Amino acid sequence: MLFSIIIPTYNRLELLRQTLASVWAQTFTDYEIIVVDDGSTDGTLEYLKSLNQRVQVLQQANRGPGSARNLGVKTARGIYIAFLDSDDVWFPWTLETYATLIAQHDSPAFITGKPFRFDREEQLAGAVGSAVSAERFDNYYASGDEWRWWGVSSFVIQATAFRAAGGFAEANINGEDADLAMRLGVAAGFVQVLAPSTFGYRDHTGNVTANLSKTIAGIWHKVGAENSGAYPGGRNRRRERREILTRHIRPVTLECLRAGRRREAWQLYRATFGWHLRLWRWKFIAGFPLKALCL
């Protein structure tokens, strides 16, 4: 089996129906679906049990999406793990695109898909299939010159590489996907899909990324992991790691200011000042204090 599809869900019954329908519409069919109910109370479990084994259903008390995904991977049989959140959707060509890239690029450890953002169902008609195009790197760290992915629904990971990296952080934080990407940093082969769009990213008020406290906790988790040597590559890859990490840290630091959480903003600024200095991020180094004075 090539793909194990892992879908964590928590109280998103109606959205989950659409997510599953998009998987069942795939033109490539060598896959299994594992849905992990993370303690839902809206009838999700009853719906999943009614599907008559079209999906494998797992359940746990509410512990967050990272923990739920790890539980799903424990029973996964696929060579690759494809992650899909229960508020996002795939397009009929999605798995076929990933299968093509796996064959073309000698089974890379890590693939990220291309998002199509939408907030109304009718907008999905604007997503169309096209010839497959992608950019390949020796590993994820080598791709750090720009942002390369958008959320965990873009992640397709070789199962052996996922397990070697230790899976997702179990803490109920935001940014567990970025943390995993960092721990996959030197795994052989990273491919970013350029075309076609491979998943629909739904913008809605229930997006977990809207929880700033969880986002801040996730940033501190990554700062701590880097400082403790939890990410691979040693000193030789330190600049590449911090190039990627600071791309996550800067917008959160500024968002703390805008949200009136000045103390937390300054804590992040001071904790990563040396990183930004060595990366010559003068605009941020000088601009943050000025912005703090104005807000």
Image (cartoon, rainbow, N blue to C red):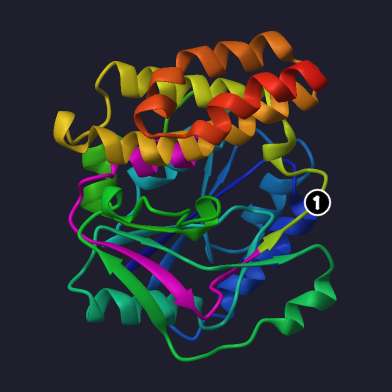
- Tell me the SS state at disc 1: loop
The residue located at (22%, 61%) in the rendering is 189
User: 152 above or below 286?
Assistant: below
Q: Residue furthest bottom?
A: 131
User: 175 above or below 154?
Assistant: above
The residue located at (63%, 30%) in the rendering is 252
Tag 1 residue? 204
Relative to residue 287, is residue 170 drawn left or right? left
Crowdedness near tag 1: few (<14), some (14–19) or many (≥20) residues, C-alpha within 10 Å = few
Observer-nearest residue: 129 or 264?
Answer: 264
Magenta-span inclusion, residue 177: yes
Quarter of the image that includes the C terminus:
top right
- Horizontal and vertical percent position of residue 59: 55, 38
The residue located at (35%, 22%) in the rendering is 225
Tag 1: amino acid:
His
Quarter of the image that includes the N terminus:
bottom left
- Horizontal and vertical percent position of residue 228: 28, 16
Span colored in magenta: 175-200
Q: Give the number of callouts.
A: 1
- Horizontal and vertical percent position of residue 161: 23, 49
